[in-house]
Image: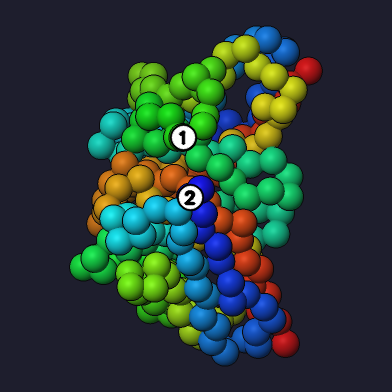
């Protein structure tokens, strides 16, 4: 059974750049999985940052970008700000009408 | 302004049923696939179900298949989640999410609601 893997935690300095990745326990991510990225701060609903690999959702600043890096989907945050400190989730379309989330990654800005 | 607003959450006993609703405003509801996503307290996100714009196709997570049914009424700009045979592990915030296309199986997710809490307990 395929599992979506995310590194559980990251840290970045203010103004710095960080890349979060999502992959599979076996196999490679491609655009056909429509990688989508979300941000969630404690006590709030998630919001969509990136869908369909690299399309920014409405209102999302261009310091958030999505891509495929090697065998994984990637979310890159450039010019990190204090309010980027959040949980980040990815999701993939696995086919047969099924979407699968990663376990989430906590980003600390320090 | 694009909005999706959930309602219908509450306390339910194990084995009982509950129906969630979601109303979409500020966009052409009948042009988008829709999703339900849940989050157990203190845990990560779990996709529950999706439905095409025209209800011709739906999908369900294995954890809810056969117990939950997603439907929509485009005339009322509304999405529904009928939850039967509820279990304590169904306790979660349930979010309604607009898809990024007319088909829930394509492109991803877009606008999220604030969620509604379902608690299954005796």
What residue does disc 2 label? B2
| Tag of residue B113 | none
Which secondary structure, mark 2?
loop
Which secondary structure, mark 1?
loop
Residue B32 percent coordinates (x, y): 32, 55
> Taking B2 as reference, is B14 left or right?
right
| Mark 2 chain | B
Residue A53 percent coordinates (x, y): 36, 30
Would you say residue B91 is visible in this rendering? no
Identify the residue at image location x=53%, y=23%. Answer: A61
Q: How many marks?
A: 2
Would you say residue B99 is visible in this rendering? yes
Q: Nearer the viewer, mark 2 or mark 1?
A: 2
Q: Are marks 2 and 1 on the same chain?
A: no
| Viewer-side residue, B15 vs A81 | A81
Contact? badges 2 and 1 (CB < 8 Å): yes
Looking at the image, is A102 positioned above or below residue B27? above
Res A74 quadrant in image: top left
Q: Is the C terminus of chain A in the top left, top right, bottom left or bottom right quadrant?
A: top right
Res B80 quadrant in image: bottom left
Looking at the image, is A67 positioned above or below residue A26? above
| Viewer-side residue, A107 vs A25 | A107
> Taking A71 as reference, is A11 left or right?
right
| Tag of residue A58 | 1
Identify the residue at image location x=46%, y=59%. Answer: B25
Residue A1 percent coordinates (x, y): 38, 51
| Mark 1 chain | A
Residue A48 percent coordinates (x, y): 50, 40
Identify the residue at image location x=65%, y=17%. Answer: A80
Which residue reaches farthest right?
A110
> Taking A39 as reference, is A24 left or right?
left
Identify the residue at image location x=50%, y=73%. Answer: B21
């Amino acid at each position: 059974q395929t599992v979506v893997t995310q590194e559980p935690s990251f840290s970045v300095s203010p103004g710095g750049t960080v890349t979060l990745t999502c992959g599979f326990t076996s196999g490679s991510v491609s655009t056909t999985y429509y990688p989508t990225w979300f941000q969630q701060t404690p006590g709030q609903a998630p919001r969509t940052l990136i869908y369909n690999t690299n399309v920014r959702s409405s209102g999302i600043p261009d310091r958030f970008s999505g891509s495929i890096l090697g065998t994984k989907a990637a979310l890159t945050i450039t010019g990190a700000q204090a309010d980027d400190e959040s949980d980040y989730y990815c999701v993939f379309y696995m086919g047969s009408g099924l979407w699968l989330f990663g376990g989430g990654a906590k980003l600390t800005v320090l | 302004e694009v909005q999706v607003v959930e309602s219908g959450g509450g306390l339910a006993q194990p084995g009982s049923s509950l129906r969630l609703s979601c109303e979409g405003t500020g966009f052409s509801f009948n042009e988008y696939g829709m999703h339900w996503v849940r989050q157990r307290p203190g845990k990560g996100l779990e996709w529950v179900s999706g439905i095409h714009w025209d209800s011709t196709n739906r999908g369900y997570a294995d954890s809810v298949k056969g117990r939950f049914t997603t439907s929509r009424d485009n005339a009322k700009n509304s999405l529904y989640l009928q939850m039967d045979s509820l279990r304590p592990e169904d306790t979660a915030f349930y979010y309604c999410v607009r898809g990024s296309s007319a088909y829930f199986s394509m492109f991803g997710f877009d606008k999220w609601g604030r969620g509604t809490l379902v608690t299954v307990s005796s």
